[in-house]
Amino acid sequence: MTAAGGAVAAPREPSPEASGSARDGRDVPLAIDVRGLRKRYGALQVLDNLDLAVPRGELVALLGPNGAGKTTTVEILEGYRGWEAGDVRVLGMHPSRDRAALHARVGLMLQNGGITPQGRPGELVRLHARFYADPADPDELLDLLGLTHAANRRYKLLSGGEKQRLSLALALVGRPELLLLDEPTAGMDPAAKAAVRALLGDLRSLGRTILLTTHELADVERLADRVVVIDRGRVVAAGTPSELVAGSGPVLRFRLANGDGTVAAIDSSELGTLGQALGGTLEPDGGPGRHRLAGRAPDPRAIAFLADWCAQRGLLLAELQTSGGTLEERFLELIAVAQPEAEPEAGMGAASGAGRGTGSDAA
Ligand code: ADP
């Protein structure tokens, strides 16, 4: 992966938009401004009063478990799907009514249905480049995404990861002001994922606005300016990655072994007593002999107590780590406590701002 450079640089002129607070408190225009969004599929309330603000120049990650409503939200923002109530503005415009005007300014990842099976990556990227006034160089973009070797291969013969990289190339070729990326690394191998991670980092440092859905939470922790977690169509948490992680509290982790290095089998009641003495609850931590004490500050006395406890039993404290939780841990906590059922809907058209217009499903 080379630096993004000319292939993805140069956002165009901004347009009038509502403003919101950037992470540093500055008042900045909102590239995406969603308020009170409601959407049903038949009896299923898939988006339930959803708010989402993406300030210009930020990378915002929309996270949630499968079925949370992420793709539906992105499809509404792309102008492909209607909604029942709420305000939706993309670069100050209505996503479906103003789709033609938005087309040149918003980069979307076309999925399988949008790409002809007989098409070849090279010709498809060149063709799409012709729709834009100031496109990226198609060959440079193919190179950037590691697709040069497959430039003349038919779409239907590409691997899942190559199809996904082509879809990303088509999103980037117009050098759009705003990128809507729905699981851009799905199906990619680790090398391709690393390449996309580097590309997202480049785009972010170039000041591009990106809304991203992904399950790669380590990437989000590193790259996102802010995170919005949704579950069952509702926002359950929002903030910078460090704000979200701060909510999960510090964690003490350790691995116990016998003197000869074999896994120490500790009676669960003894572990229970140890947890109490350390001031929390010990949980298994994914691996033989591994435990974690969540939700309490790593206290030097707790660590000294644990070391002493091990010494008395002839056990080794084979690994010891104190840290804040990870975004993944916080995410799992948030999802576990989210309310199981959405409330019954009262008057779909009555929510504020319904007058801005209701789209109709266009795809
Ligand atoms: P996510 O992207 O977070 O996994 P989706 O927006 O794809 O969630 O889906 C949210 C819910 O809506 C899921 O329960 C899914 O099965 C349902 N759903 C998605 N698309 C449709 C559709 N076209 N018709 C009916 N139900 C749908």
Image: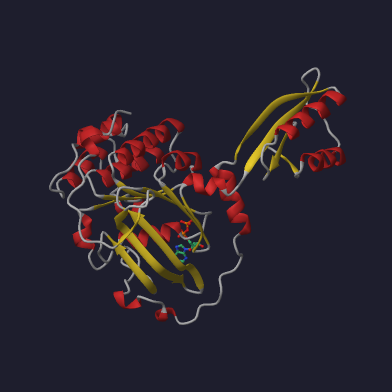
Residue 77 coordinates in the image, percent (x, y): 33, 60
Quarter holding residue 295: top right
Q: Residue furthest top?
A: 260
Q: Is residue 291 left or right of residue 336?
A: right
Residue 59 against residue 46 in the figure, above or below? above
Q: Is residue 51 left or right of residue 355?
A: right
Residue 170 coordinates in the image, percent (x, y): 27, 45
Residue at figure coordinates x 75%, y 35% from the top left: 302
Residue 291 against residue 213 in the figure, above or below? above
Q: Quadrant of the C terminus?
A: bottom left
Residue at figure coordinates x 81%, y 19% from the top left: 259
Residue at figure coordinates x 80%, y 17% from the top left: 260
Nearer the observer, 121 or 347: 347
Residue 19 coordinates in the image, percent (x, y): 30, 60
Residue 261 against residue 135 in the figure, above or below? above
The reply to whether residue 152 is in sight is: no
The reply to whether residue 54 is in sight is: yes
Q: Residue furthest left?
A: 133
Q: Quadrant of the N terminus?
A: top left
Residue at figure coordinates x 28%, y 45% from the top left: 208
